[in-house]
Amino acid sequence: MLLDLASLFGGLAILLIAGDVLVRGSVSLAQRLGIPSLIIGLTIVAFGTSAPEFVISVRAALDGAGGIAIGNVVGSNVANVLLVLGLPSILAATYCGDEGVTRSASFMIAVSLVFALFCYFGVIDRAAGVMLLALLVIFLTASVNVARKARRDRRRNELEAIDDEVGGVPSRLAVAIFFLVAGLAALPVGAQLTINGAVSIARAWHVSDTAIALTIVALGTSLPELSTTLMSAVRGHTGVAVGNIVGSNIFNLLAIIGATALIAPIAVPAEIVSFDIWAMLATSVLILLFAAFSATIGRVTGIAMTAGYALYIVIVFQIGAA
């Protein structure tokens, strides 16, 4: 059991470090190539912070562990709303009425419904993967067009937000290339260790590997978003948190599931269809309501959301042990 725990948490640690290193190296190279910071934020940073989820889902799909491939993404989306948004709100109130968040949250719900429909067929195949990736292209294109019409000072604020999120970007080309190569090389290793540990622990605890993916693995891969949001709360910059979470959830469903299904069809466990899909949709509606009414999430609501995530964990383990 100790070896399995070491494999799980060691793999997650490698994934988090490798993803961070990959982002730093990629941003440095992109800046040298003259790629606009806005595009860097929408593509390289978004993909880099989701790289742990991506490599785990691909590796799991190739190994025939569909529960881990799907559970990792669904669990991350639930954690992003209830925990990543709720926990920092205990420290500092989070305003949800920023421009464009309602539109993005509505698109997130539409994407979640499409994803849920695919799940009800039992398998997310390559055709579904192509459709999800096509929706991703639409989302990124729309995001770029909206950003280009933004005021100059707003684009400057977005650049500062990217710089805050990705600190320590290497200035030397050799270091940037090393970061890029090291990150790409370490990600598959971390993914394999994480999956091996998750499956072994699931068997030892007599729960499904889907339950482990929905909870421990999903929480581990959501740590970058959680740490970033917590630091924003400490600094008093909570305004961007909701937009970042919505974007991350959209990217998880479209890019990670879409690309994974394109590589290998994903079998969807019945337990995810019966409960977790609904939990994900409910949290998506919750964040849309916050945005539509320009609500401010205070300490009481933050505590309630964090407690709701704890309850979700308990229910998942109960279902997984049934």
Image (cartoon, grey):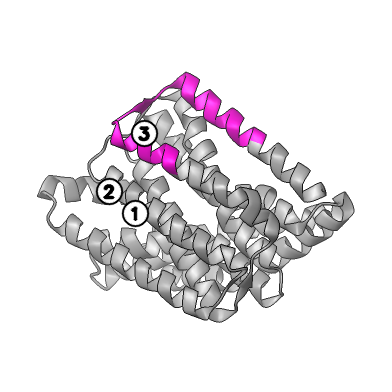
**Distance between mark 3 and mark 2 Cα atoms:** 12 Å
N-terminal label among 1 and 3: 1
**Distance between mark 1 and mark 3 Cα atoms:** 15 Å
Q: Quadrant of residue 145?
A: bottom left
Query: Pointer 1 and pointer 2: residues touching (CB < 8 Å)?
Result: yes
- Which residue is labeled 1 in the image? 107
> Circle 3: is it few (<14), some (14-19), or many (20+) Cα within 10 Å?
some
**Majority SS type along the magenta span:** helix
Magenta segment range?
285-311
Image disc number at residue 320: none
Q: Does the stretch in magenta take in 44? A: no
Q: What percent of the width, then of the height, locates residue 99? A: 22, 42
Q: Quadrant of residue 170?
A: bottom left
| Front in this rendered view, residue 162 or 101 | 101
Q: Is disc 1 placed on a helix, strand or loop?
A: helix
Q: Is residue 68 above or below residue 236?
A: below
| Identity of the residue drawn at 72% across and 51% down | 211
- Which residue is labeled 3 in the image? 290
- Which residue is labeled 2 in the image? 103
Instruction: Say what amino acid the circle numbered 2 marks.
Output: Arg
Instruction: Say what amino acid the circle numbered 1 marks.
Output: Phe
Q: What percent of the width, then of the height, locates residue 222? A: 55, 49
Q: What percent of the width, then of the height, locates residue 101? A: 29, 44
**Distance between mark 1 and mark 2 Cα atoms:** 6 Å
Q: Is disc 2 placed on a helix, strand or loop?
A: helix
Q: Does the stretch in magenta take in 310? A: yes
**Left or right of 220, for residue 94:** left
| Identity of the residue drawn at 71% across and 74% down | 64
| Front in this rendered view, residue 277 or 72 | 277
Q: What percent of the width, then of the height, locates residue 215? A: 67, 47
